[in-house]
Image (cartoon, rainbow, N blue to C red):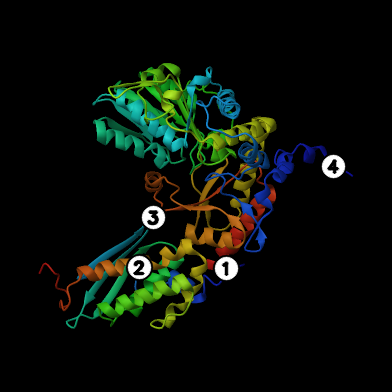
Amino acid sequence: MDQDGLYQRQVIERARAPVHAGPLEGATGRGEGTNPMCGDRVRIGVWLDADGRIGTVRHQTRGCAICLASADMMAGLVAGQDRIGAATMGRDFTALLQSGQDGDSCPELRVFAPLHRHRSRIRCATLAWSALEAALIEAPAGTPVGETRDG
Amino acid sequence: MDVSPSVMTDPIDALRDRRADFPILGETVHGRPLVFLDSAASAQKPVQVIDAMADTMRTQYANIHRGLHWMSERTTDAYEAVRDQVAGLIGATAREEVIFTRNSTEAINLVAHSFGSLMRPGQAVVISEMEHHANLVPWQMLRDRTGIELRVAPITDEGDIALDALERLVADGKVALVAVTHMSNVLGTVTPARRIADIAHAAGARVLFDGSQFVVHRRVDVQAIDADFYTFTGHKLYGPTGIGVLWGRRELLEAMPPFLGGGDMISSVSFERSTWATVPHKFEAGTPAIIETIGLGAAISYIEAIGYDAIAAHETALVDYALQRLAEVPGLRVVGAPAERGGVISFTMDDVHPHDIATLLDRNGIAVRAGHHCAEPLMRRLGLSATARASFALYTTREEVDALASTLTQIRGFFV
């Protein structure tokens, strides 16, 4: 069946058995991305360590295989990054989706490159990154584990 | 050649030759023949419509209603002839009851604005749970502007309007209008229009039907269903975009204030005050979609030449066949089981999101719609965020349904 390389094995497997899915207890930042065109939704919970680096990200995703795989791979890849590093990865990923050209920061995300030929589906892949951006705006840097901004 | 009578009379094959009227059906997508199963979103156009519009622009075009020259008069004649065609199509008793709008959405907004301005706080509008946003949002806007109440008639799990609940909703006599679809764009449900009209009228309410889907598949008779308002859009009826219809009973239209102001809708204008033209022109401000209206006329001629009997027989047989073929696809669930279904089938598949279904079908040349189909509250009622939807037109074939079913089986195998 012709699928234009959109659904590579990693994508299908991550969508079928995500490893970072579920709520994050003690998240210091939460964000949500929605696609009003289709009703898909990604909720992200994140906490930052004392150095302002991303400790754990978990996602709760209601969406297609591309949306789900993208959210799950993102959650694994951004751990250990600070805000600037995560934002750079997000920008590179968007550039990859729009051009089909390899970004440097995350070779693992190249499995989504064929999406550049399917512009109506690009939002499926970027939904989690929008949610992460919102979560990181909310999350205060250096907040100890388990302590919320409101104390 | 041996051709058995059953083949000769097969209602699906009976329209096969009509495919040649639709040039786009000869196109390929991703190197495969186009299988267009998204006609409920917008239908493809026959060459008769394309030519009528192009010929208008080539040989007979000017602004209408105001010119004193030959070209304007001829174009006015062509435009106004379509009003007669529409009146004939839906059984209107007077051509003045036919108002041209941009689409069905605008027609409903017109009623919400103009009929709505006659309503008083405390009065109510009833819609159903399976309305397109076009027949929901205008009423919410009216409610928020004027303080009327908006009530929602529930649907059954099968996808039919719960008529007993509708009767209770109108029982207090406060309902001024029942506004419901004549055929659901998601479930394919054909609603029992006459019974709904009887329920509304018994409670002193008027009734509006959104016929955008229905008019494509079955003959509408606004007298037989005792409607007060009826709306549809041209582009789903094999006509162009940008032209829709509101039909309303003359006494209601005459009592209603204008919707948009401007040229063509006035009787006289001074800086102090203006007076309005008579219906239908009171509701047609500005230069209308002249070329598109003439295109709609060509579409109606095309439909009438084929005949609704043949169109409905084709669709009924095709839907039965499709339901049978889709039942063979592992993990596929058809959404809704209404008492009467038009040529629309929504479905979900275990473990495969509707977007992934639509993208993979598209890679194989098959166009379907996926998403909430502009009916988010219905999706919530069904406990779904999205469905895939295959919808049929007079040019749809049995082989295209076969292609859908076999590709869906492959997609399911790919994911599971």
Going by the numbered disc 1, the residue's amino acid type is Gln
The residue that label 3 is drawn on is: A39
| Amino acid identity at mark 3 | Gly
- Residue A19 visible, this angle: no
Left or right of residue B317, residue A59 in this image: left
Q: Chain of mark 1?
A: A
Q: Disc 1 on helix, strand or loop? A: loop
Image position, residue B404 (x, y; %): 62, 55
Q: Earlier in the sequence, mark 3 or mark 1?
A: 1
Task: Tell me the residue that label 4 is attached to.
Answer: B3
Which sits earlier in the primary sequence, circle 2 or circle 3? 3
Give, as a three-letter code, the residue at label 2. Answer: Ala
Dot 3: element = loop
Residue B73: percent from the left, percent from the top?
A: 58, 25
Q: Chain of mark 3?
A: A
Q: Residues within 10 Å of mark 1 (few under 14, many from 20)?
A: some
Residue that badge 1 annotates: A3
The amino acid at mark 4 is: Val
Q: Residue at left 27%, top 25%?
A: B123
Q: Quadrant of residue B49?
A: top right
Residue, far front: B69
Disc 4: host chain: B
Q: Quadrant of the N terminus of chain B?
A: top right
Could you classify mark 4 by the number of other residues whose Cα lies within 10 Å: few (under 14), some (14-19), or many (20 or more)?
Answer: few
* Nearer to us: label 2 or label 4: 2
Q: Which residue is mark 2?
A: A128
Badge 2 and badge 3 both on one subunit: yes
Please tell me if label 4 and label 1 are on a single chain.
Answer: no
Query: Do marks 2 and 4 both belong to one polypeptide chain?
Result: no
Q: Are marks 4 and 1 in contact (CB under 8 Å)?
A: no
Is disc 4 on the same chain as disc 3? no
